[in-house]
Amino acid sequence: MSNSFYITTPIYYPNAMPHVGTAYTTIICDVVARYKRLTGYDVKFLTGVDEHGQKIQEAAEKNGYTPQEWVDKMSLNFINLWKELGISNTDFMRTTQERHIKSVREIIKKVNENGDIYKGEYWGKYSVSEETFVPENQLVDGKYMGKEVIDVKEVSYFFRLSKYQDALLKFIEENPNYIKPEGKKNEVIAFIKQGLQDLSISRTTFDWGIPLELEEGHVIYVWFDALTNYITAAGYGENPEKFAEMWTNGTVNHVIGKDILRFHAIIWPAMLMSAGLKITDTVAAHGWWTVEGEKMSKSLGNVVNPSDEIKKYGLDPFRYYLMREATFGQDADYSKKAMVQRINSDLANDLGNLLNRTIGMQKKYFDSKVILKEEVDTFDIEIKELWAEVVKNVEIKMNDYQFSEVLKEIWRFISRMNKYIDECEPWKLAKDENSKDRLSTVMYNLVEASYKISVMISPFMPTTATKMAKQLGLDIDFDKLQLSNVLEW
């Protein structure tokens, strides 16, 4: 195994503006990427945009652009927002890039050589909004996921997805951590057991896509194109050494919304099996966001714009709220009242209070110099034992994508340190000439705890962590810091 940790967002459709849902997915990946850097991994973090398909072509024509001009313009919305959100991605994929076109053609070639592509005719329903062919048994009231479908009849090339039904079930059973959370895994298993149908991988009714080399006039179906982006960025078909390190021997994790779980946990691993490639280590699917209890939609005018929220509340409070408010895998509600409550209670009263009291007393009693003349009490032992417990729990919960629980653990320590101040009463110690050593110990522990907290919150709130460190008189590059250096007390 290599030291590589590779995490990806889905590639987003650039037709629509990014919203709180896409921001949430990307922030999740950023939090994981930053934490894994702290724990010593060589982190590669991919995000990007899916620039091919019928939806893109139709939107471009409607707005008076060529498809390429349209995606050039719309992709900037994502590039700019990720900068605004402080996203630490190491790569940005655009499926119109030449490197991606090469890797798609390479995987098609491998899958075809394995006998898993054949020519046939598709006749049935197609969802333009989801860019997918829809079997009759997936329609509800004539719609797919609440959206209209159209009738399509055309000659197409197919991928033998049905061939991999048993192999997929076996793989999921043998790799219990492949799909997170557990409930989503059960959904995928139930879906596979209903029976898989072969997948159409080419279209002839539009031309905005990667041409299929098997026959002129066919373009590669958008999902077969889109999913391949993950191996494109790992160097597939172009850089064997990089691919071995990042994909074959590294740890690979996809984070997605629950609506595209089937594509990532069924179609994608079947493609990888067919091409003789390693299957992703983890596919983690999160829930959707409602707004003040209502479904987010353009028609209701309640789509949350991340840029607006950052201007209102600040970047780190926005990031913190998304990670703290949602239980991973479940739907969550975006609420102004809850946001304000989190800022006032968690950030100002708990974290802010601890830091401000610590810095104020350290300056007052020791002229901001950290001096340790150790005189230990039971309170000191308690906080150190709690710290060790918190560090252990954070590692477990972070690896299980339980971000809200991670923050609860960190805040359990923050609350304990606020209580530690009240228990130790440094203001009384400062008045007693015989308690100077004890005061030195208490203040050392408070400064040390504040430093440790800044490191722990840095994946979630990098700007706040840097500001905290500076207020403590420390110049820290959290991207280069190793968590192992702050584990011991």
Image (cartoon, grey):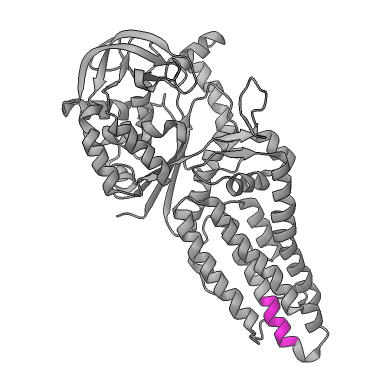
- Residue at x 57%, y 45% (from the top left corner): 326
Residue 431 drawn at (x, y percent) = 83, 84
Q: Quarter of the image containing the C terminus?
A: bottom right
Q: Is residue 229 visible?
A: no
| Displayed quadrant of residue 307 | top right
The count of marks equals 0
* Relative to 52, residue 26 above or below: below
Residue 327 versus residue 107 in the image, above or below: below
Res 360 → quadrant: bottom right
| Image-based side of 63 in relation to 203, left or right | right
Q: Is residue 442 magenta?
A: yes
The spot of residue 392 in percent (x, y) is: 48, 65
Task: Provide the residue span drawn in magenta.
Answer: 436-444
Residue 460: in sight, yes or no?
yes
Dominant secondary structure of the residues highlighted in magenta in the image: helix
265 horizontally vs 362: left or right: left
Q: Position of residue 183 (x, y in %)?
A: 42, 43
- Whether residue 424 sits left or right of residue 143 in the image: it is right
Q: Quadrant of residue 285?
A: top left
Nearer to the camera, 125 or 75: 125
188 left or right of 404?
A: left
Q: Does residue 202 sit above or below 258 in this rendering?
A: above
Residue most extreme to the bottom: 434
- At horizontal 38% and vertical 11% (from top left) the residue drawn is 207
- Percent coordinates x, y for residue 281 in the rendering: 34, 46
In the rendered image, the residue lying farthest to the right is 431
Residue 334 sits inside the magenta stretch: no
Tell me: residue 98, above or below residue 54: below
Q: Residue furthest front?
A: 141
Which quarter of the rendered picture does the N terminus lie within? bottom left
The residue under the point 28% across, 17% down is: 212
